Amino acid sequence: MTSPVTPPPSGPPPSSQPTLVRIALRAGIGLALFALITISSVAVTRALTAERIAANQQASAYQAVADVAPLNHDGNLLKHTVTLPAAPSLGQLKPFTAWQAVSDDKVIGLVVPVATNQGYSGRIEMLVGITYDATLSGVRVTQHRETPGLGDAIDVKKSHWIKQFRDHSAESVQLGDGGIDALTGATITSRAIVNAVHASLLWYQNHPTQQP
Ligand SMILES: Cc1cc2nc3c(=O)[nH]c(=O)nc-3n(C[C@H](O)[C@H](O)[C@H](O)COP(=O)(O)O)c2cc1C
């Protein structure tokens, strides 16, 4: 008599089931750890970068204001801010922030943000530095869309044209005639800036509270 044949067990051997669960569990934990490390490193990088971006923005804001401010200020331009009422002639339709140049606790000048829409390609933004005697300590364009190779020479990185405004007064800020030389092929751009700077000096003269 033959003994009954035991049918082979179906499915994976009983011992391999816990192994599969273990593998899946290990893969899951690995994946979760990977995600955690990735998220943390992105967060850390972002925090470090944000700090550096803010510091760079602060530094370049300071540089732009310092470039046009009267020379002998106390080095704390960004601390001496004043909020001034709207001044449409400066292109400021709402109250705006300006920077006072201070020396020995006396205000020796003011840096004002000025905008004009008279550019060849629209809006031009600039910083205008004015000394207490209503002469210009400097002008720099901070934003514009003028044509590369023509109007973009207003940017101090492209040419020295904007530097000629220094020491001019309301009487002498005019195109030509011993005043400001226009950029060749960019008279519209040049005139837009001359007009805006001239308007800034007139505004300053009419706002004695901004003077020491
Ligand atoms: C494609 C193009 C771009 C121009 N870009 C400017 C510009 O950025 N600024 C400007 O004042 N005029 C610009 N112009 C206008 C002419 O340069 C200018 O009106 C004309 O040449 C007169 O020259 P003038 O500015 O020396 O008087 C542009 C003209 C063209 C066709």
Image (spheres, rainbow, N blue to C red):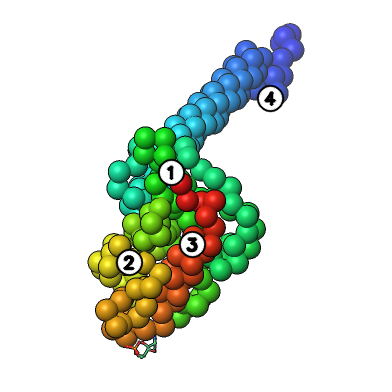
Real-space Cα separation, disc 2 to disc 1, in angstroms? 20 Å
Q: Is residue 125 above or below residue 85?
A: below
**Pointer 3: residues within 10 angstroms few (<14), some, or many (20+)?**
some
Residue 168 is labelled as: 2
On the image, the x and y values in percent for residue 78 come to 45, 41
Q: Is residue 21 visible?
A: yes
Which SS class for mark 2? loop
Which sits earlier in the primary sequence, circle 4 or circle 1?
4
Is the Cβ of the residue at disc 4 closer than 8 Å to that at disc 2?
no
Q: Is residue 176 above or below residue 74?
A: below
Tell us which disc is closer to us: 4 or 2. 2
Real-space Cα separation, disc 3 to disc 2, in angstroms? 14 Å
Is the Cβ of the residue at disc 3 closer than 8 Å to that at disc 2?
no
Q: Quadrant of ligand 1?
A: bottom left
Which sits earlier in the primary sequence, circle 1 or circle 3?
1
Q: Is residue 48 above or below residue 205?
A: above
Q: Which residue is mark 1?
A: 107
Tell us which disc is closer to us: 4 or 1. 1
In the image: residue 107, left or right of residue 91: left
Q: Which residue is mark 4?
A: 11
Which SS class for mark 4? loop
On the image, the x and y values in percent for residue 105 come to 42, 35
Tell us which disc is closer to us: 4 or 3. 3
